[in-house]
Amino acid sequence: MTEDDSGTLPAGEVSRIELRGVYYAYRTGTGHLPVLDGLTFACGTGSFTAVVGPSGCGKSTLTRLIAGLMLPDRGEVLLHGEPVRSPRATVGMAFQNPVLLEWRTILANVLLPLEIVPNRLTREERRNRARELLALVGLGAFEDRRPSELSGGMRQRASLCRALVTRPEVLILDEPFGALDAFTREDLWQTMHALRREERFTCLLITHDLRESVFLADRVVVLSDRPATAQVTMEVPLGDKRALDDLYGTEASELQAELRQQIRIAQQARQTEPAA
Amino acid sequence: MKRQVLVPVAALVLFALAWEFLVWVNGWPDYKMASPSDLGPAFWKFRGLFLEHSWETLWRTVAGLLLSVAAGLVLGMVMGLSRVMREALYPLLVGFNAIPKATVVPVIALIFVGAHDMNTILIAFLISFFPIAVSISIGLSTLEPEYRDILRSLGASRFTIFWKIALPKTLPEFFGALKVAVTLAFIGTNLMEIVEPHGRGLGYLFDSGKISADYPLMFAVLIALALLGIFLFYCVVVLEKIFAGWAERSET
Ligand SMILES: Nc1ncnc2c1ncn2[C@@H]1O[C@H](COP(=O)(O)OP(=O)(O)O)[C@@H](O)[C@H]1O
Ligand SMILES: [Mg+2]
């Protein structure tokens, strides 16, 4: 197990996602609410980073900054070395709420981003691309169904397909499996591994499930309580081929225990704070 | 399918029979209460007038309704997309909507004396735009932020987001409101037609039946109004099925 607080990469490599001293505060009716303060970390191309932290610490805020939906007050968010100033089509997103459009079929839902992002694909090529993804996540037979006809897990699979249909360089997942039951969630983890084998993307996964972070990611970043910084970063000592049973091996168990400990430290910081 | 037709028809026949029976038992003459068997002759006698005035009522109601949809859409969009505008406009609209339109009718009739078409359309519009504006504004302001984020993160413009997501998502609520609005607009048209002297439309026909104490004619007008109202309502239902049919399935 290695710990690495600096978030730097081997010299010469440009990281796909990089945050440098990011500060962000929400302007509320009663003043400023600092949410991120001096957040610094980087993700290499093709890496899979999980971000965990106490609830309300600013994880979703982080995803919105990387997606360019909001700009940091101070510091920089860089995608492939370039500062993010506005949303860009090279980022795909999926949330806990799959937000599929009920008036569209599953296939048409997956095709939506291709109607917005400029591309030179023909109608048939777009459809083939969407079908390829749907087949990969096991929804090949459901392309003509409406979202309401699908189970929660299947909707989330469709939402992943929609996020990936434009072949984004960066995939941001904000607690995508949080609302699913335990068995469905484990199925979706396997799907994520399958997607990662077939598609090329750098993934940032927000989660509150430590087992999930260990099973899916190469690295786990623990955020401190609000205003959040990267409290600690841990490498996951499992190889590329992972089975659920690996989660119960010595190394993985120790890592989960350590993560749990770190979350506890982050939470205690909140309880000792004077009430605002 | 068979039952869906038979049951309403049977109910209708029973209703007509009970009505006929009531008039017959009490021995009411024509000038007190018309019976269903008087209606056929009344329709036949005034068939030309019925066609002409039904058309007047129909097109004015639809014109008023189209104005309502246009104004309701604009107001709803303004209120749904801007919180400041919602806070500013909402009390005004509620206040205006609270005024019983029967009091507005003579005012309008006096302001634009003789402009029958405009007056009637105006009342049909004034009485019916409120539910449309409210439904659109609620539909737009309750759009989950994730929808916007997904499209915005792809670089979609505000117009694209409105066109691809916000508008279609609001359609079920819009049609729900339109069903209320179509009935209201119809009431508005008739109010104006009855009140205005030398007017046109079924309301006018009703008024002339009253003046000449032709009770069968008055009742025939009521039936014609009911038929026209049903026709308009189901036109909206058909449009709803076409444009927002997807919402039905998701509720089951
Ligand atoms: N639009 C907003 N305006 C004001 N405060 C917000 C807004 N969005 C989130 N917050 C606050 O910022 C903090 C971090 O939010 P968020 O990033 O959603 O946390 P997390 O995803 O880690 O649970 C929370 O305390 C939340 O209440
Ligand atoms: Mg969140």
Image (spheres, helix red, strand yellow):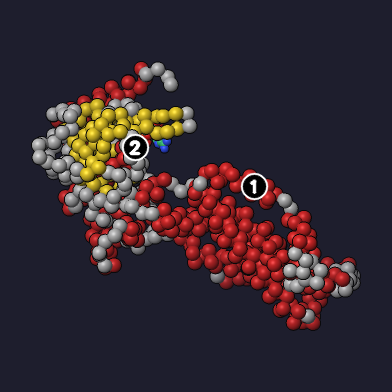
Between the residue at mark 2 and the residue at mark 1, the CA separation in whole angstroms equals: 37 Å
What quarter of the picture does the N terminus of chain B occupy?
bottom right
Q: What element carries label 1?
A: helix
- Amino acid carrying label 2: it is Thr
Residue A238 at x, y = what percent?
14, 37
**Comparing marks 2 and 1, which lies closer to the viewer?**
1
* Residue under numbered circle 1: B92
Residue A101 at x, y = what percent?
40, 55
- Amino acid carrying label 1: it is Leu
Q: Which of A192 and B127 is in front in this view?
A: B127
Residue placed at 33% from the left, 27% from the top?
A227
Residue placed at 43% from the left, 46% from the top?
B144
**Quarter-of-image position of residue A263:** top left
Label 1 chain ID: B
**Quarter-of-image position of residue A275:** top left
Q: Residue A40 carries which label?
A: none
Let me know if marks 2 and 1 both belong to one chain. Answer: no
Is residue B87 something one can see in this rendering?
A: yes
Residue A77 at x, y = what percent?
26, 39
Q: Is mark 2 on a helix, strand or loop?
A: helix
Q: Quadrant of ligand 2?
A: top left
In the drawing, does residue B60 fall left or right of residue A52?
Answer: right
Ligand 1 contact, mark 2 (Cβ < 8 Å): yes
* Residue under numbered circle 2: A61
